[in-house]
Amino acid sequence: MLPLETVREFVLDRCPARTPVSVPVADALGLVTASEIISAEAIPQFANTAMDGFAVRSADVADAPCELRVVETIAAGHAPQVTVGPGEASRIMTGAIIPPGADAVVMVERTSIVPDDSRDGAAEIVRVEVSVPPGNHVRPAGDDLHAGAHVFGVGTELTAGHLGVLCSLGMTEVKVFPRLRVGVLSTGDELVDDGSPLRPGQIRDSNRRTLLALAHRVDVVPVDLGLAPDDPDRIEAAIATGIDTCDAMVTSGGVSMGDFDYVKSVLDRIGDMAWMQVAIKPAKPLAFGTVGDVPVFGLPGNPVSSMVSFELFARPGLRSMMGHADPVRPTVMATAAEDLPRRADGKTHFMRVLATPRDGGVEVRSAGGQGSHMLWAMAKANALAVVPDGDGVRAGDPVDVLLLD
């Protein structure tokens, strides 16, 4: 059996980042920047107010309360037309430009309008109740970013906030590592996916839907290649479709050493594949290689094995192809809330657990049955406890975990 780290390094070496492309900012969520982004302009481009209120000269309100003549109303998106002089103020709305002459804003809640009948139709008067310093509630030009600033470096995964910044800079396209198309294929005569009653020996195909969903979570475009029976010609045709239309492929089933594991024979004939036994449980068998320049991940057929194998090998490989500098999910230290027993077998066990915050840390407990066929327990789990070879982890002991959600 091969160590996990050795096999994963083998996979990552054969999953280089794809050639960068420019895509619309609207389509870039989850992608990784392929070039440095420099601000071509300041954000904000002009000094503006953080509050609804009145733009004033701070010197005029030093002895507040006081009264000032209102010379203008400035709404967001409109340029001021009047300079604020001594004894004057401009009504101003959040985000509007600070008018010339003003150096501070008094929030509207600390002001009141003097009734009209006291001035016989003269200009509106505002009573200011508090003194404020220069710059009060004023957002200076370039307060967020100045022109020429380094915004995001190469290798930045673009989140919603990143996209907002790009739009603020007026960018409509961004250079990124492209989103992958990843084909998912299930194989096996025993599988049924049309909802029909099961005949003896048949099971329903859960792996394909699960793997398509896991691929979606990696921010790729999942491509459903369907279900192929245990027929070499049908399997080869399905794989050929995936190779022609996708950037990577994931298959489920047919990677062990049985007489009917036709995926192995087909991939051996058309690709450059390695068939490995990894020192882990579940997910010991793994096929990986390339057909042409398309990586192919041959995952085991047991549902939990398939999911764990995707997490440990396919997910890092796909992330590497999309330019992620750290494609492997990091482990965090948790505390076992109960015993996590196992038997020594020369493998690292990835136990399905429920992780919850506790006392500033994380504690974990079993999610249920640990068999490689027990998909319900895997569905309830939100983490995998990394339990080294031996007799397990005792309640209260530390344990490394992979947080899946």
Image (cartoon, rainbow, N blue to C red):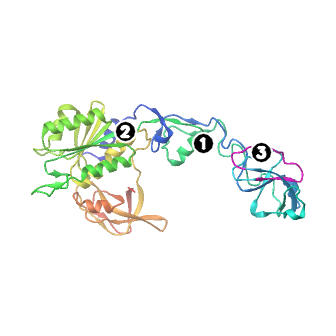
Q: Position of residue 357 (x, y in %)?
A: 45, 65
Location of mark 2 (residue): 180
Q: Position of residue 60 (x, y in %)?
A: 88, 55
Residue closest to the eye, 107 or 287: 107
- Whether the residues at callouts 3 and 2 have beta carbons within 8 Å, the answer is no
Decide if residue 357 is on the left or right side of residue 375.
right
Q: Amino acid at mark 1?
A: Ser
Q: Amino acid at mark 3?
A: Pro
First in residue order: circle 3 vs circle 2 = 3
Q: Position of residue 194 (x, y in %)?
A: 19, 52
Residue 152 lies in what quarter of the image? top right
Decide if residue 264 is on the left or right side of residue 358.
left
Location of mark 3 (residue): 80
Location of mark 1 (residue): 168
First in residue order: circle 2 vs circle 1 = 1
Residue at mark 1 to residue at mark 3: CA–CA distance: 22 Å
Q: Amino acid at mark 2?
A: Leu
Q: Quick check: 345 above or below 46? A: below
Residue closest to the eye, 253 or 226: 226
Q: Quick check: 349 above or below 310? A: below
Q: Position of residue 149 (x, y in %)?
A: 63, 38
Going 35% across and 41% down the picture, which residue do you hit?
317
Residue stretch rendered in magenta on the structure? 75-91
Decide if residue 50 is on the left or right side of residue 287.
right
Q: Secondary structure at mark 2?
A: loop
- Whether the residues at callouts 2 and 1 have beta carbons within 8 Å, the answer is no
